[in-house]
Image (cartoon, grey):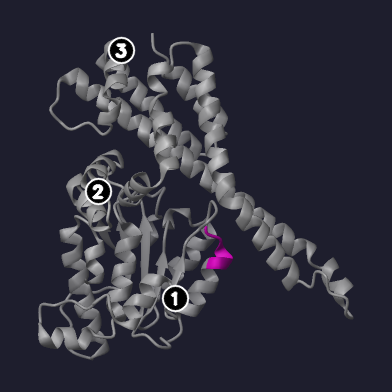
Amino acid sequence: MTVFQALIGQDAAVAELSRAARAAADVVAQRPVQLGAMTHAWLFTGPAGSGRSVAARALAAAVQCDRAEALMAADPTAAPGCGECLSCRTVRAGSHPDVRSIVPEGLSISVNEMRAVVGMAGRRPSLGRWQVVVIEDADRLTEGAANALLKAIEEPPERTIFLLCAPSTHPDDVVVTIRSRCRVVGLRIPPPAAIAEVLIADGIDPGTASWAAQASQGHVGRARRLARDDQARERREAVLAIPARLTSLNACFEAADHLVKAAEAEAKALTDDLDVTESDELKVALGAGGTGKGATGAARGSAGVLKELEKRQRSRATRLQRDALDRALVDLASFYRDVLLVQAGSPVLAAHPDFARDTATVARSIDQAGALVRLDEVLACRTAIELNVKPKIAIEAMTAALRLP
């Protein structure tokens, strides 16, 4: 299994990245390089679940592949990235010394974090064939971080590749100056059949795999969670039951309260233990509990460091809460899409066939214009939360607008 097989339903992107991997091997071997096949900066775009970070890591593994020369000698059309050698495995595991990843846990990527990574990327490869920087969620770069990255991309070090991932090429996602210096690879939502095949290969029964692939709306990671995690299925069911129940203003406020509290609880469950572990480890590193000379002074100087850690932890919790709310809003948006399909008598397969009764109920209660207005309200709520409107205010405004007549 090559590293590119992890990209589901992305044949055009796989072909382009395979050419780039062959060109990267030619550069290392000092052979003539196919014109335009390789560049030092890439931008992977596409909707959530399309595999942006998977594509970036696949290319990172392919350019580091230990068996590149042997594969290309045996078959000139073959691409590096065997998926079995030490370099391929360590890149995919996130432990390769020459592949650095920025995966933001909080709301943004800071300038200090970017400067540190860019500085290390300017060195020559230590064990691998290239220095590779993978930046997931490049749309979270602060202005200072974007400027630090721009300088590195404008004057790229030799044998260094930058791989950025972002939802789109819109200036709000990636600034134009960076985008214009990157080769853009657009990824599409993989079809449900392709996702179902992957789930079946993972050992999931065909019926569950088919349902999860459709319900995930093209998001491979969420399809896996829905197929395996009872709590994920329960959260989805609770969200999709909301539209048919919004028959009074009180029901709207109750639904909003449920959505926000569920997102807070999900974020808290994911962060509580991690926060305690991080705080304890940092305190020990700063000399907590020490009795030797200087221990008291070290403890006095640790307050600022602990405060910075708490700030990062709050940012991470906020990010996780927003992500949980966003998943719920995507489900609601697809519910109203299903309503429109019912109203139009379309043969297109519904995203949530297990909620056909609720979909039919709402479809009878409102007309097509009403369904479109409600779909717009859900999407507007997503935008408001991205713009830092307090989640409870944004969700309450949305549920009030979704109320059935």
Residue topped by disc 3: 366
Kind of residue at badge 2: Asp
Give the main secondary structure, helix, strand or loop, of the magenta stretch: helix
Q: Is residue 111 magenta?
A: yes
Distance (Cα) linking label 2 and label 3? 37 Å
Mark 1 or mark 2, whichever is nearer to me: 2
Secondary element under disc 3, as helix, strand or loop, is: loop
Q: Is residue 173 left or right of residue 259?
A: left
Q: Quarter of the image holding residue 332?
A: top left
Q: Specify the segment rendered in magenta.
A: 109-113
Q: CA distance from mark 1 to mark 3?
A: 54 Å
* Residue lying farthest to the bottom in this orientation: 30
| CA distance for labels 1 and 2 | 33 Å
**CB-based contact (under 8 Å), mark 1 and mark 3:** no
Where residue 96 sits: x, y (%)? 42, 78
First-in-chain label (2 vs 3): 2
Q: Quadrant of the N terminus?
A: bottom left
N-terminal of the pair, mark 1 or mark 3, is 1
Residue on which the image places disc 2: 205
Q: Which residue matches tag 1?
A: 95
Residue in view at x 10 percent, y 82 percent: 76
Q: Secondary structure at mark 2?
A: loop
- Above or below residue 256? Residue 205 is below
